[in-house]
Image (cartoon, grey):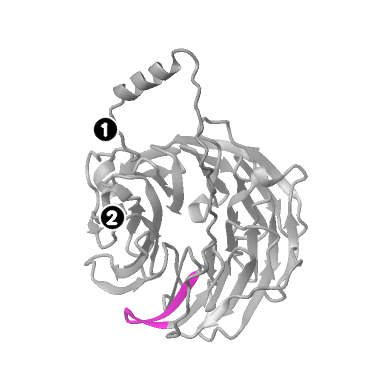
Amino acid sequence: MRMDKEPVQPRNDPVNEEEDTEGDDDETELAVGEDEVEVIYEDGLEDEIANNMDNLDLENVSDEEDDIVPETDHATITFRAHQGPVYSCEFHPKGRICATGGEDEMLYVFDSLTTEIFLEEKFQDSVTLIKFNHDGKYLAAADMLGNLICWKNSNNSFTKVRTLKLNSPSWMEWHRLANVLVVAEKVYFCMWKVPQFDTVKYFPLDCYSETGCLMPDGKSALIGYDEGYAVILDLATFTVTSKLKQNDMNCEHGIVSVDAHPNNNVVALGTKKGRVILFTTKKPKVIEMIDMPTVSDGEFIESVKFGRDVLIGSLLVAFSNYLHIYDQAKLILRHKITLSGHAVKLVFIDPFAYIATSKAVVDVCNCNAGVKNYSIQGHTKAIMDMALSKLVYLLLSIFHCSSMYAQRSSFILISNIFSQYFIVVS
């Protein structure tokens, strides 16, 4: 635990208070001497370079990859308000209202069936974190500069409750039953009681935390560290109750995905180097370590999930362009499914897993049968985030719109997933 300097606590700013966010930019000037420098080429090299430059087709050079042309468009609704890449999305717990944030520094809250906009807020940087609380009465969003805003929602009318200034927030969660908000930033793990924001706790992080979650019992938090281990933090005392670490783990195995079993006794950690580790939580010990096969584009564990309901007893692992489904008790590989592209995010309604991919499609996989049923199409760029509404059966996915087309609206596609399912497989 890092305690070598005085805490710099996030500030609770009044709603209407303006603050100067312009820092003093440190400019480093490179002093170049006035003496001429003579470049000496090997024999014939200068002519070869000149010939190669003449042969370059500079008009067709582009730093942007071509758009992916979908074979069909499964979207029920397309939301086009954003100007540029869209990075984050979230559904209201009741399923119809959704929120999105993008590089254009805008947050939108809108009706997913009519696209009527209920809230639009200009931030100071790209909006990357968005979360509704458990009953949808509060919404929190943060940008890359650390500006966090919380609103109260009353019949789709949003009133700003509080603004906070954080230090590079990386992940954010609401408690599943209480109006309690937790945020991991660069130095601290923070917790507030909403809407008062008067009860706040700070836990100094050992190092950067890219991912984490609240445990199913709501009494503790699982915090993954970039140095290759995780801790379980008691939310009442803000003390570490378990440290989950293997002896050979280091920063090469930084934790990038986590999940907790519904029984609260087992957690799964996914690493940058293609390793999944299962730990017990009461008396911490390694249950099993699974190393993914080596692939050309890396074994980064994008998502690790314990199965629920009909998939209880399963462990889902998305990495590279594969979905592996394991028997959790026997720890054997049940199914291996090849995806359309590199996995970006995984969500599921049993027994189906929905995997957003870099190839602009969402693959729909039957985890019991171990097959990819079909792919939801409509995007033209790699998908950046995805959210699933379990109540009205809508899938919300967003993708990167190249800066080359900054004047063209980014697309947010909303698909009726169960209708698509019956149409495709019938």
The percent position of residue 286, horizontal first and vertical second, equals: 73, 48
Going by the picture, which residue comes out furthest to the front?
Answer: 35
Within 10 Å of disc 2 (Cα), the crowding (few <14, some 14-19, many 20+) is: many
Residue 215, quarter of the rendered image:
bottom right
Classify 116 as above or below 263.
below
Q: Earlier in the sequence, mark 1 or mark 2?
A: 1
Q: Point out the image quarter for the C terminus.
A: top left
Under circle 2, the secondary element is loop
Mark 1 lies on residue? 60
Q: Secondary structure at mark 1?
A: helix
Q: Is residue 171 rendered to the left or right of residue 390?
A: right
The three-letter amino acid code for the residue at tag 2 is Ser
Q: Which residue lies at the image location 40% right of the left edge and 21% below the top edge?
A: 49
The relative height of residue 351 versus residue 323 in the rendered view (above or below) is below
Residue 256, horizontal then vertical, whole percent: 58, 50
Stretch in magenta: 147-160
Kindly identify which numbered label has been placed on residue 410: 2
Q: Residue at x 39, y 55 (%)?
A: 386
> x, y (%) of residue 242?
74, 61
Query: Is 253 on the left-hand or right-hand side of 131?
Result: right
Crowding at dot 1, Cα within 10 Å, few <14 / some 14-19 / many 20+, comes out as: few
Front one among 107 and 361: 107
Visible in this render: residue 246? yes
Magenta segment's dominant SS is strand
